[in-house]
Structures are given as structure tokens and as C-alpha cells.
Image (cartoon, grey):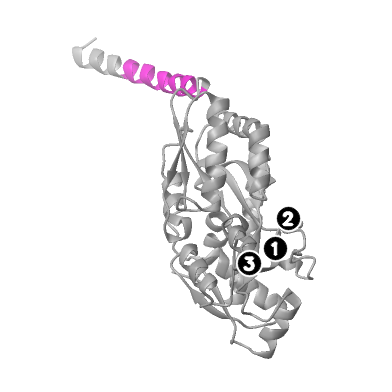
Amino acid sequence: MTSLLRRSLMLSLAAGAALSVVPMAYANGAADFPNRPIKLIVPFAAGGSTDMVARLLADKMSVVLGKSVVVDNKGGAGGSIGADAIAKAAPDGYTIGMATVSTHGANPAIFNKLPYDAIKDFAPITNVMSVPSVFVVHPSVPAKTMKEFIALAKANPGKYTFASPGTGSLGHANIENFMNLADMQLLHIPYKGAGQAINDALAGQVNSMTDNLPSTLPHIKAGKLRPLAVLALKRTDVLPDVPTYTELGYPGMGDGGWFGLVAPAGTPKDTILKLNAAAHKAMAMPDYLEKQKSISGESMGNTPEEFSKQIRAAIDRYTAVAKRANIRMD
């Protein structure tokens, strides 16, 4: 055997051995998962509803897994920046993230050029919690009920305003959907984030807005905003006298927002199942359930396959909304 042939044979054997080791090492990595801290990316700023849910879950999952689950806020562009960071992370289970009706429902339906694909780029882990949103008006608006507000809006097309966190945001899409269903016209005032929108709603600079209940509830309790409807499966205990949109005759508004866990596409199935099991154990803890109730949350835990179907359903629903309201963004 020539030296050249011998060298070629040795290289081939070495390459084959290396290839056989890779799957075994990868499998071993999944088998002892997790052996270091996990990063949980929240695609919105600290202090909002997504952040509240994420921090509550991360705290309890850290206990279950025996490794820290560290929240990393990456806000901006309606959640798209953070969602893209989740999608482009290594698919090893050590970077996971929060998926919401914004990032995995409204955004794919409304934006032409998202940096991520809400279906192909993620591996769903589990839905976690639904939190109601609430439609509120400033106390200066002469309407005590949604029926009265709709009558005012119909009598004065374009006179009454609504604030949103920005054009193409979930808040914008939801109100456009409601205007279509109720056959009324409000004037849209977009802001750069929910914080600015709430501030002007509190000041009476805009007449109405919709926002997640946890961030709006203190202002409702203080009498600075008046609630007219909640977007949820059922009435919330903290606002028992406020009807759902479905009760008001508008089931087309859907059943509210949700917050779930996703990983980058390609994350090993065993790792996904471990994360799913850990999340479900965390969600069953008594202090978790107590804090969930304090923000009017409802448990939404399910399988990866069920959560995948919910994501697809949200995209379909908001695609229809965007088409009816002619909302499309580059």
C-alpha cells in the first residue's frame, strides 16, 4: 500500500469516527440538560404584562430545574427584535423565550418584512397564561357602558379617539377589529409604546384605549380610567361588573391574549419535553397560582403540539382582521 493511499485511508477512518461521536455527544448534552443557567428572552420592556408572566415563571422553573432561569428583556419593534433573537439562538434549550399574541399572531399577519417566521423558526414548548385586556375611556367621556360609547361614536364619526402603542400593534389591530364589528369609527392616535399611550389616556388627551389589565388596573381602581369591556374567555374577578366582548355581542373579538414559551427551531425534542414538564410543575406551585390570580391570569398550560395549533389560529385570526381593516406594514 502506497503512503498516499495509507494516508487517505487513515483520514477517512478518522472522519468517520468523528461523525459517530457528534450525535453521541449531542445526545449526552440533551440527557443531562440543564447543566447551566437558561436565558429566557422577553421581547418587551421590563414591567409590562409579558415581563410579569416571564419573571413569575422563571422564578419557579429555576426551583424545578435546579438551575437559574434568567430573564433577558429585548424590547422594540412590537416584540420583533426579541422574537428574532430567540429564533436565531442556538437550538440547545439554553435560550428560550416568551411568545405572545403580538409576536406570534398580529405581527406575522400585519408586517410584510418580519426578521423571523413565527411558524418555521420556533419550537413551541407550552402556552402559559392568558391575561385579559381591557377597553377603557377617560372619565370625561359621557358613556358609562360600552353600548353608550358605541352610540356616541356612531353619532359622532371620527370625533372620539383611541390610543395604541403604535400603528400595526396588537392594540391597534384589536380596536380596528372592534370598529369593524360594531360598525363605528374612532380616530386612531398611535404612540411609541404603551407607556406613552396610557399617560395621554390618563390626561384625557385621548378618549379611549385598550391595554393589558395588569398595567391598567391601578388606574381603574383610582378612578382615572373607566372600564367598558374585557377581552377574555370570561369576566375577571377583579372587575366582576365589566362584561366580555362576547357578552356584548362581539365574539369575533376572540378570547384575549396569551403568553407562552418557545425555543429556537431544531431544539431537541427531549429538551422541549423537559422544559414543558418543568414549566407545568412551576405553574402548579401554590405561590405561582396565587400571583397568577393577582394579575387576573388564567392557566393555559398545554402540549407543544396544542400550543403550535394556538399559534397558527392566532395568525389566521389576525390575518383576517388585517385584511378587513386594510392594515399592512413594511
- Position in image of residue 126 (x %, y %): 62, 41
Disc with the residue nearer the chain's start (3 vs 2): 3
What secondary structure is marked by label 2? loop
Name the mark nearer the viewer: 3 or 2: 3
What is the spatial separation of the Cα atoms under label 3 and label 2, in whole angstroms? Answer: 18 Å
Q: Which residues are magenta?
A: 12-30
Nearest the camera: 156 or 128?
A: 156
Residue 51 position in % (x across, y down)? 51, 48
The residue positioned 71% from the left and 80% from the top of the image is 150
Q: Which mark is residue 230?
A: 1
Mark 1 vs 2: CB contact within 8 A:
yes
Instruction: Give residue 11's position: percent from left, percent from top.
Output: 28, 18
Image position of 142 (left or right of 169): right
At label 2, counting other C-alpha atoms closer than 10 Å, the crowd grade (few under 14, some 14-19, many 20 or more) is many
**Quarter in which the C terminus is drawn:** bottom left
Q: Which residue is mark 2?
A: 236
Which is nearer the N-term, disc 1 or disc 2? 1
